[in-house]
Structures are given as C-alpha cells and as structure tokens.
Amino acid sequence: MGIVACLAGIGRATIDRLKEDPDLVEGYLYPDDGESEPPNCIDLDKSWHCIHFMLTGQAEDAEPPLGWAVVGDEEVGEDTGNGPARVLSPEQVSKVSSALIDEEAFRRRFDPTSLAQANIYLHEMCVRDGDDALDYIVDNYRGLVDFYRNAAARGDGAILWFC
C-alpha cells in the first residue's frame, strides 16, 4: 500500500477551530467516517518524498517556504497513523505558492542517484524506471502547484497529512 501525502485548502477560522479542539482533526480529515474527503483536497500519492527532495535537496526538514510545501509546519491533533496533521496559515500558503519552481526547473532536479543516496521513498522506482518515474513525479508536482495557486487565490491556509 504505502504512504500517501494529502493536502486540503482550509480557511483561517477552521484552522483556529482545529487548533482549539484537536479532537476535531480526524473528523475533518476523514468526513463521513472516511467515505469522503475534505473540500479542496488533493493527494500526491507516493511521490511526496521525491517532490520534497527535488524542491529542497533534503530528505527531511528543510528551510521554508519550500520545506513547507509537502510536509507543512505546525502540528495539530493526534497522530493519524503516520504522524499528526500539520497546518499552514494563509500567509504561509501564499509564500509556498510564490516559491514553487516552474516545471522545467523541477524536472532538471531529478537525479535518481541522489534520490537513492538520500534513501528517498520510491528511490528504487526512480533508478529502475528513469523518465517514466519522472513523469509520475512531475504529474503530481503539477497538482501540488495548482493546489497552492488555487489555495492562495482563495486566501486559504492548508492542512497536510500522511495516510
């Protein structure tokens, strides 16, 4: 199955409500007992760690704003199975949106050897499949860019979690 990264656009009032009552986080992330997803939600599938590394050059913690793009910032709520959810304020979302690089620059950062050396999730696929793996990662990166542009345009923050 594997670990998937999910993001949802979220208004400031909802962020405040979730911070005030962290018990509400799981219900927000998995509405209708998990039958639905929150509004303005995307998932990066299993490409999340490759995207994070290609944006930041780091396997884990990285400098903002690009370091926030996939993993978020402030923890909120309990562990959802792969750590607690994290939130970004509307101002942070705007900074991430402005910092994201264009697709061609992102493509140039693909280096399967570096991904393997850093032990990035899916590095075996990247080494084995080369350009096909890159196409998969770039397709998810496009979704990430669209997510941040749309969230910033709405004035939303974001909640990010791994499932």
Image (spheres, grey):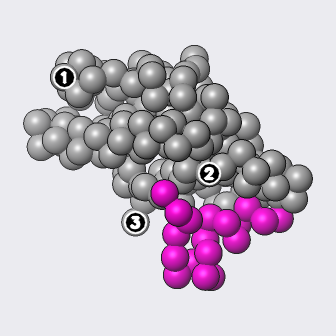
Q: CA distance from mark 2 to mark 1?
A: 29 Å
Kind of residue indicated by mark 1: Glu
Location of mark 1 (residue): 104
Location of mark 2 (residue): 10
Residue 148 image point, x, y percent: 45, 38
In the drawing, does residue 12 fall left or right of residue 22? left
* Magenta segment includes 130: no
In the drawing, does residue 24 fall left or right of residue 143? right
Residue 124 image-quadrant placement: top left
Please provide the residue range marked out in magenta: 23-40
Residue for point 33% across, 21% down: 101
Residue for point 80% across, 48% down: 16
Kind of residue indicated by mark 2: Ile
Kind of residue indicated by mark 3: Met
Q: CA distance from mark 3 to mark 1?
A: 30 Å
In the rendered image, the vertical position of residue 37 relative to residue 17, given as above or below: below
Residue 160 image point, x, y percent: 58, 48
Q: CA distance from mark 2 to mark 3?
A: 27 Å
